Image (cartoon, grey):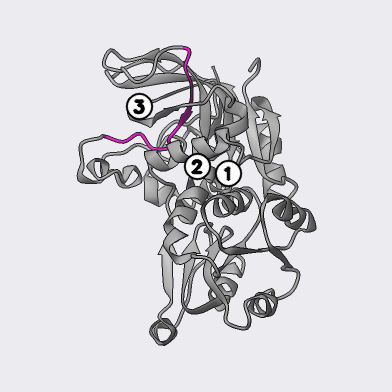
Amino acid sequence: MKAVRLHAYDERPVVEDVPDPRISGPFDVIVEIGGSGLCRTDLHIVEGQWAEKTGVSLPYTLGHENAGWVREVGPAVTNVAPGDTVILHPLVSCGLCRSCRAGDDMHCGNSRFPGIDSDGGMAEYLVTGARSVVKLDPSLQPVDVAALADAGLTAYHAAKKAIPLLYPGTFCAVVGSGGLGHIGIQCLAALTAAEIIVVDRSTAALELAKQLGAHHTVAATADPVPEVLQLTDGQGAHVVLDFVGEKGTEAQGVRMLRRAGSYFVVGYGGAVNIPTIDIISTEINVVGNLVGTYNDLDELMTLAAQGKVRLHTRTYPLDAAGSAMEDLDGGRLQGRGILVPAGR
């Protein structure tokens, strides 16, 4: 089969032939990929940012946002069957550790993360686990929802965690209306009554944000903090969801907070540097976010089937993975890029 393989850090992956995956365990599920999302994490992987954290051996196949059709299952699999249309939770979890039993799939101590620490789904086929597959509503197609498997799941998980803080009359500032942020805006609009302020450098991204539920937009061509403060009566936002997390948004996001506000780090690549006296004197919170649970993904698929969350995407043939990465890295890709194997 064809697969997008990373052979060396700081070099673009290449598309090459590799053996098809095979069933090796009782709970294995082989999925024919209908769409694999392209994420900034893939760029960070190529840059080597994940090398020490994962210890993955090169070469390997990228792709951690995947959806498609079940083609083969292990002998113990009962929840899906060949032919089922599915989206894949990004982690293959064990189901036995304390985190799994508590429903915190993303903190499984025995997990595998295809596309991050093992072969992923930028390929024609992917082997995953029975606990990772979520059946799709007949109205949904893999190519249309693939990026919800991670980008959507991460955005939904962060918005869901913020719900108790976003009662009517509150303000939520969303930094970045790109691949992650445009999903987060829709999740906030579906789940909360907060006024949503979206900050982005792109005029097109801000226009999209208005269409998706933003109440206010702020151009980040200069320092956006004063305008956010003005929109919040000088107090700042109750919650800031930073879907960028680098190149200065970390400092700006914290400055957008009101007293006792919460800064949710969703995008990454930079560093959060806050004097401890500022943390205690204003009692602000810094909250990390890592994908989400199986139930989060299942709930998100319900919102997608209801038409409350939709992806703004651009599709590329699997063979054009290099061009897609160049577009993402160069800021030419609005929304999410989806790689589609030939014939899908």
- Of labels 1 and 2, earlier in sequence is 1
Residue type, label 1:
Cys
At which x and y percent is residue 34? 58, 23
198 vs 203, left or right, is: left
- State the residue position of label 1: 39
Residue type, label 2:
Asp
Q: Which quadrant: the C terminus?
A: top right
Dominant SS type (magenta):
loop
| Range shown magenta | 83-94
Residue type, label 3:
Gly
Does the magenta run of residues contain 88? Answer: yes
Q: Considering depth in this image, is 316 or 18 the residue closer to the camera?
A: 316
Q: Residue farthest to the front?
A: 168
Q: Which quadrant: the N terminus?
A: top right
- State the residue position of label 2: 150
At which x and y percent is residue 270? 53, 64
Task: Identify the residue at horizontal 45%, vertical 59% (top origin).
Answer: 163
At which x and y percent is residue 256? 58, 75
Task: Identify the residue at horizontal 49%, vertical 49% (top origin).
Answer: 156
Q: Which mark is residue 129?
A: 3
Q: Is residue 63 visible to us here?
A: no
Task: Identify the residue at horizontal 57%, vertical 82% (top origin).
Answer: 235
Q: Is residue 214 visible to us here?
A: yes
Does the magenta run of residues contain 48? Answer: no
Q: Which picture quadrant has residue 252?
A: bottom right
- Of labels 3 and 2, earlier in sequence is 3
